Image: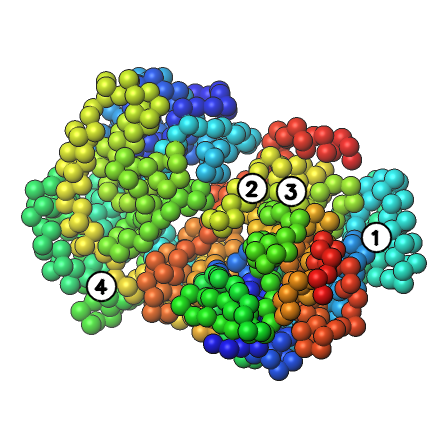
Amino acid sequence: MNVDAIVVGGGIHGCSTALHLCLAGLKPVLIEKDYAGRHASGVNAGGVRQLARHIPEIPLSIRSMGIWEKINDLLDDDCSFESYGQVLVAENEEELAVCRARVAELNALGFTHEELIDAAELRCLVPAVAETCPGGVVSRRDGAANPAQTTTAFRRKAQQLGAIVREGVAASHIRYSNGLWHVDAGMETFAAPVLVNAAGAWAGKIAADLGEPVPVETVAPMLMITSRVPHFIDPVVILRGRKLSFKQFKNGTVLIGGGHLATPYQDRNETVLDWKSLATSAQTVFELFPVMRSATIVRAWAGIEAKMKDDIPVFGPSSRHKGLYHQFGFSLHGFQLGPGAGAVMAELIVNGGTQTRISDLGIDRFHPSAF
Amino acid sequence: MSVAPKREDYDVVVIGAGPAGLAATATSAEAGLTTLLLDENIGPGGQVFRAISSTPVTDRNQLGADYWVGADLVQALRASNAEVIHRATVWSLDRNLDIAVSTGGASAFVKAKRVILATGALERPFPIPGWTLPGVMTAGAAQTMLKSSGLVPDGRTVIAGQGPLLWLLAAQILRLGGRIDRILDTTERRNYFAALPHAFAFLTSPYFTKGLVMMREVKAKVQVVSGVTELSASGEGQLASVSYVAGGKRETIPADLLLLHQGVVPNVNLAMAAGIEHRWDDLQLCWSPVLDAGGNSSVAGIAVAGDGAGIGGANAAVVRGRIAARAAVEALAPAAAAKLATMAALRSDLAKAERGRPFLDTLFRPASQFRIPSDDTIVCRCEEVTAKDVLDSVAIGATGPNQLKAYRRTGMGPCQGRLCGLTVTELMAQARGKTPQEIGYYRLRAPVKPITLAELAAVPKTEDDVKAVVRG
């Protein structure tokens, strides 16, 4: 079947790109080997964060934030998005000095979304935080959303607007001939001038098979969720010096993350948790938030995702093949970027360029362009 | 009895001290393997032999001869060198055979060369209108109180449902002087015909005479209504009445207590969280682990025995426990296996113990209206999601229990779907015209039982983590 674009991968990125291609009048097919949001996109911490991002991806993050704030208009689904800010906590003066330098650097580049806060303001934003913390950084427009709901909503809207969605079949036998990309999905074959590689942890292999290997590994960051506890905190909290992030939802449950890793078994869609590392997270929460001590952990899990060696995504056109675009390797912070990345990817495909600065994210940072 | 495990590594760790776990542990330890038995209850016995070494009910006739069989199993366990820890909640098991267990408010990690899961059965959900009202409870919960404390109902009591346990409980309540106003039998009439081909095996099985005697004993004292096709509980914040339809006629009776039961299903929570492959059993209407003849699962080193491997009853559970233990001994200490009963003898014991089971499974196969709720009947108690909510989500694209979480919080509350899983799978399967196997089940994950943050925080850290914190 001939379509306008083939998107491989039904994470938030693939779904968002499919949706934005539909909005631009194209007819894409989305091919997902499991179901949309099965892996990292559906089971991440749901952080909608501009805070503490690598500088090369800040423009994309800001672009995305604008879409998040009107997500209901785009998707007819609020995605449970709420915006109480995200706060980076410095636990001592040395950490606060790093925060100060960071904010100054961003301001010099013209970015103003991160603000340095002192101990008083920190206590005001996060009353439960330990007395000894001298301050931190806040990004006030940030927040959190429900990742499974969000990714599903993108998939559903894309489908409503005409995208063909194939779930439960893997994209295979990817090849280029006569000016078209051909991809098999189960019994079907799709052909299109455009191919988007948004296959998450499975994208590195697709890129390598097409002659563009990149330094990427598969990781599985762990999360855990508690039973309901009385409301005590609004913003998402991240610690500057320790691996911990922390979010209380409206229903009182608290999500504890921070990047400790499980062992992924990618071929089996499985992860094996490392409880001793999760215990470290529990210990940190125990120290900082006494209110949490008697909460029970009801579930722990890990999503499977791609992490680049340099921790920034591969985003933009291939450096070797016409019509091929990469959108993967978001390295544990791709969820917030999803809406904006889909919009920018559609601009690249439809217009051949974008106003959003993404030049440092290209795959050509690993391969000199063949064009 | 120790509190924390004495070692970090064992040849065999058995989880659950019901019939299968007791037999497996004794067999494994007698063969000289270092064996640890972890059990959640305060004493051995599991559900069927609950409180076997502590029950205040001493008149042997009241609980029945089958109950006291458990005492011999406990004796064999105590005669062995096995290490036994009660009040031990295993909350994680993975494919590396790493086990996390909570004892006395602290967690410990042990590793096994072989794990035998003997996690038994859970009562099948019975989601009728009003089933979440105070005053409605499961027959199993009532039996727990009866065995461990000798407590029986004294208010207006209705028992509804079907299956051997229902009759056993009714008999036990009556023997202990409890009150039962009416029994509402939901067995479908057509099941009697469907079960006929299996009747001969059943007639020659030990279940038959015992079952008949027990039913006769109950029917002599309590009004039994058979062929009940509809059932609901109602009341304002507390059960007040039970309404039912039998033979096309509706009747409503006042009640203080409604005990519900429609059979048991394998407790697969830990097995699924460990990554063991399961299949839908169309006769027993539940998930069962895929096992070989030695009870070995799809995860190397983990076997499943007892009702957790598919409902077979206590006698079969004992034999399956011995088979799984023998398989472990054959793998770890082949020379010691010579002392044990041969696999052939055990298989023959198992065939004998399982005789009559297809008859029971067919006769007591619960009717769809009592498994698959409709309208405003609650499906997920934790998050108060109704059948209609689930169907609405299916209509806009939810394809299975895991996908449903993107629409509703079904299965995301404190029980993590352990109570509503079967209902959700069957409800979605019916709505989508698919088989439960195609629809699938919640992905279950550790902790299989909730643990407190404080307890997890107290777990010893890895060296790397200690260094990371020191580095800051």
Label 4 and label 1 in one chain: no
Q: Closer to us: mark 3 or mark 2?
A: 2
Determine the secondary structure under disc 2. strand
The residue singled out by tag 1 in the image is: A137
The residue singled out by tag 3 in the image is: A260
Q: Extreme bottom residue here? A: A25
Determine the secondary structure under disc 3. loop
Q: Chain of mark 1?
A: A
Which amino acid does the dot numbered 4 rest on?
A: Val
**Quick one: label 2, few (<14), some, or many (20+) residues within 10 Å?**
some
Name the residue: 78% across, 59% down: A360
Task: Give the quadrant of the N terminus of chain B.
Answer: top left
Q: Is there CB contact under 8 Å for labels 4 and 3?
A: no
Q: Closer to us: mark 3 or mark 1?
A: 3
The residue singled out by tag 2 in the image is: A263
**Quick one: label 3, few (<14), some, or many (20+) residues within 10 Å?**
many
The image shows residue A210, relative to residue A3, as above or below, that is: above
Name the residue: 41% across, 52% down: B419
Measure how far apart labels 3 and 1 are at the Cα level: 22 Å
Q: How many marks?
A: 4
Question: Would residue A51 be found to the left or right of residue A19 on screen?
Answer: right
Task: Give the quadrant of the C terminus of chain B.
Answer: top right
The residue singled out by tag 4 in the image is: B228
Determine the secondary structure under disc 1. strand
Which amino acid does the dot numbered 1 rest on?
A: Val
Q: Is there CB contact under 8 Å for labels 3 and 2?
A: no
- Identify which residue, A318 or B420, lies in the foreground: A318
Measure how far apart labels 1 and 2 are at the Cα level: 32 Å
Q: Position of residue B340 (x, y in %)?
A: 23, 21
**Quick one: label 1, few (<14), some, or many (20+) residues within 10 Å?**
many
